[in-house]
């Protein structure tokens, strides 16, 4: 009851800010669910997700919870921070688990003697070419042939011999 009396004593602008904060964070709790589901179902090491970013959000929510509980003594803020901590922590923990599973898999034999490199960084999830020295092959009929340069419209094809 004291929290409601406190809200009624605030100016209309501050009261709107409090309700906006509460409502956006209530919606935010629901937005964790699709991300948790996507990371849970991922079979390729959650490479599209940055563990560094989600980990920093988890630590940030932990700090917000500590601040709300120990400094501000604000129960609603502590509750919201705790819920956000659980959401971010779930995404981070599941993604880290998937990433470790992906990096621990036995390497697949590389084609034509090339060395296999697992794509993506363990922490940031950035993609990299799967094989060192691998280049994407041009589409058939694109004007690219081995040992040639691209044809420019209106010019004849120039062939460069490889050494």
Image (cartoon, grey):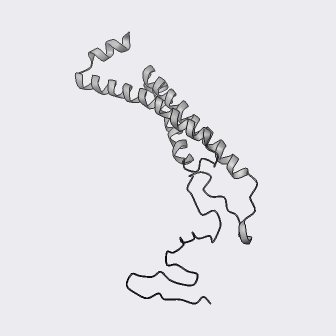
Nearest the eye: 114 or 17 = 114
Nearest the eye: 138 or 33 = 138
Q: Residue furthest left?
A: 12
Q: Is residue 162 above or below residue 94?
A: below
Q: Residue 22 appears at what percent x and percent y?
A: 38, 25
Q: Is residue 65 above or below residue 111?
A: above
Q: Is residue 160 visible?
A: yes
The image quadrant of residue 86 is top right
Residue at image coords 28%, 22%: 15
Q: Is residue 67 visible?
A: no
Residue at image coords 61%, 40%: 41
Q: Residue 36 appears at what percent x and percent y?
A: 56, 36
Quarter of the image where the C terminus is located: bottom right
Residue at image coords 62%, 52%: 122
On screen, residue 147 versus residue 21, left or right, reads right
Q: Residue furthest top?
A: 1
Q: Is residue 145 above or below residue 3?
A: below
Q: Residue 31 appears at what percent x and percent y?
A: 46, 33
Residue at image coords 42%, 29%: 27
């Amino acid at each position: 009851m004291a929290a409601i009396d406190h809200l009624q004593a605030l100016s209309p602008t501050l009261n709107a800010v409090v309700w906006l904060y509460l409502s956006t964070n209530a919606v935010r709790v629901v937005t964790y669910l699709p991300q948790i589901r996507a990371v849970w179902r991922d079979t390729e090491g959650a490479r599209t997700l940055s563990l560094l970013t989600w980990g920093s959000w988890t630590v940030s929510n932990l700090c917000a919870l500590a601040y709300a509980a120990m400094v501000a003594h604000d129960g609603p803020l502590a509750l919201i921070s705790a819920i956000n901590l659980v959401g971010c922590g779930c995404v981070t923990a599941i993604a880290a688990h998937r990433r470790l599973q992906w990096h621990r898999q036995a390497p697949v034999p590389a084609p034509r003697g090339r060395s296999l490199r697992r794509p993506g960084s363990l922490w940031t999830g950035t993609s990299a070419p799967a094989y060192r020295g691998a280049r994407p092959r041009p589409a058939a009929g694109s004007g690219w042939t081995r040992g040639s340069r691209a044809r420019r419209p209106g010019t004849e094809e120039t062939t460069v011999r490889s050494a």
